[in-house]
C-alpha cells in the first residue's frame, strides 16, 4: 500500500502556483526532463504523485494548447508511475467536452478547473455541465478555490457541488484562507460530495480544527507540488490525529477517490 498520495502536485511551477504563468510551448518542449522543476525534493517511500498542470498557461492555439498540456502531463505521469489530471477551458464549449472524453480514454483521473484563470464563475452553468460530464466518465473534478477572486469563492464552489450531487469534487487551496477555515467549521464543510485538499494550510491548529469539523474522510493530502511536499507532510505528521485519521488523510481518501 502506498504511504502517501499527493493529490495536488503542480507541475512546471516555481511554486507560486496562484500567480505563476508558464508558456505552453515551454511545458511541452521541456517534457519529463524539466518537469523536475516541480519534482519533490525528497520522494517519500512508495509515494504516488497526482500531477496537475500549472494554473496559468498560454492559449494562443486554443484547444490545441489544452491537448498539448494534457498529453505532456499524461506522459510524465506514466514515466513517474503517478496519476494525471488534465485541463479543458470551459469557454471552448463542445471542443472542451471532446477533450474531456479524450483524456478520459487515455487514463486521466479527472480535470482540474481554475475559474479565475479560465474567466468563469465557479458555479457557472458551463462549469456545472462539464463537472457532471467528468463524473459521468468516472473521473473527478478538482476546483481551485483560493481566496483571490470572487470566481473561486468558497460559496460558489459550494453551489457548484450542490448542483452536481453525484459528482465527487475536491476544493484545492481553500484552506490557505483563515476566513474559509472559519466558514467550513461553521457550516461544516458544505455539500457532502465536496472534499478539501490541505495545500496552503500553515498550522496544525487550523488543520486539526478542519478535520474536527468535517471529519477525516473529507480531507486529503495535497501539497501544491515541489518544495511544499516536505513541509505539508511534516505538518500532518505533527497533528494530534490518531493513526486511522492520519492514514486516510495521507492516502486512504485519495486511493478511494482515484480508484487506485
Image (spheres, rainbow, N blue to C red):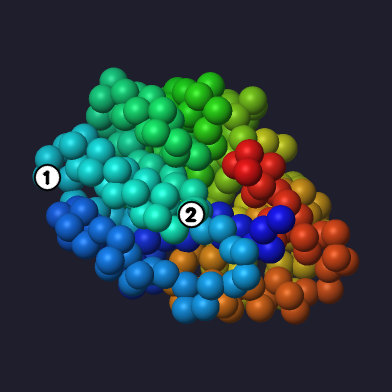
Q: Quadrant of the N terminus?
A: bottom right
Image vertical order of residue 12 relative to residue 37, above or below: above
Image vertical order of residue 189 relative to residue 89, above or below: below
Q: Which residue is mark 1?
A: 60
Q: Is residue 184 visible?
A: no
Residue at the (80%, 52%) spot, across then down = 215
Q: Secondary structure at mark 2?
A: loop
Q: Residues within 10 Å of mark 1 (few under 14, many from 20)?
A: few
78 vs 5, left or right, is left
Which residue is more in the foreground, 7 or 124? 7
Which residue is more in the foreground, 150 or 141? 141
Q: Is residue 34 visible?
A: yes
Q: Secondary structure at mark 1?
A: loop
Which residue is more in the foreground, 73 or 249? 73
Q: Which residue is mark 2?
A: 81
Estimate the x, y position of residue 177 in percent, counting from the top left. Answer: 57, 64
Residue at the (53%, 72%) spot, across then down = 43
Estimate the x, y position of residue 30 in percent, counting from the top left. Answer: 21, 62
Amino acid at each position: 500500500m502506498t504511504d502517501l498520495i499527493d493529490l495536488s502536485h503542480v507541475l512546471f511551477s516555481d511554486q507560486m502556483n496562484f500567480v505563476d504563468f508558464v508558456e505552453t510551448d515551454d511545458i511541452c518542449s521541456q517534457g519529463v526532463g524539466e518537469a523536475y522543476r516541480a519534482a519533490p525534493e525528497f520522494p517519500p517511500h512508495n509515494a504516488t504523485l497526482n500531477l496537475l498542470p500549472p494554473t496559468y498557461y498560454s492559449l494562443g492555439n486554443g484547444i490545441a494548447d489544452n491537448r498539448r498540456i494534457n498529453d505532456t502531463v499524461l506522459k510524465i505521469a506514466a514515466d513517474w508511475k503517478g496519476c494525471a489530471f488534465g485541463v479543458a477551458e470551459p469557454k471552448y464549449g463542445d471542443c472542451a467536452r471532446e477533450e474531456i472524453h479524450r483524456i478520459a480514454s487515455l487514463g486521466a483521473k479527472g480535470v482540474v478547473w481554475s475559474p479565475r484563470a479560465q474567466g468563469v464563475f465557479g458555479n457557472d452553468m458551463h462549469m456545472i455541465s462539464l463537472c457532471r460530464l467528468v463524473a459521468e466518465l468516472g473521473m473527478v473534478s478538482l476546483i481551485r478555490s483560493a481566496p483571490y477572486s470572487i470566481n473561486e469563492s468558497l460559496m460558489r464552489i459550494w453551489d457548484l457541488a450542490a448542483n452536481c450531487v453525484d459528482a465527487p469534487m475536491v476544493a484545492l487551496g481553500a484552506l490557505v484562507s483563515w476566513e474559509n477555515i472559519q466558514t467550513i467549521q461553521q457550516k461544516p464543510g458544505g455539500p457532502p460530495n465536496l472534499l478539501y485538499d490541505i495545500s496552503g494550510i500553515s498550522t496544525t491548529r487550523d488543520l486539526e480544527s478542519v478535520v474536527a469539523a468535517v471529519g477525516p474522510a473529507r480531507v486529503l493530502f495535497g501539497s501544491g507540488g515541489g518544495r511544499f511536499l516536505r513541509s505539508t507532510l511534516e505538518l500532518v505528521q505533527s497533528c494530534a490525529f490518531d493513526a486511522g485519521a492520519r492514514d486516510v488523510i495521507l492516502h486512504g481518501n485519495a486511493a478511494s477517490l482515484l480508484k487506485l
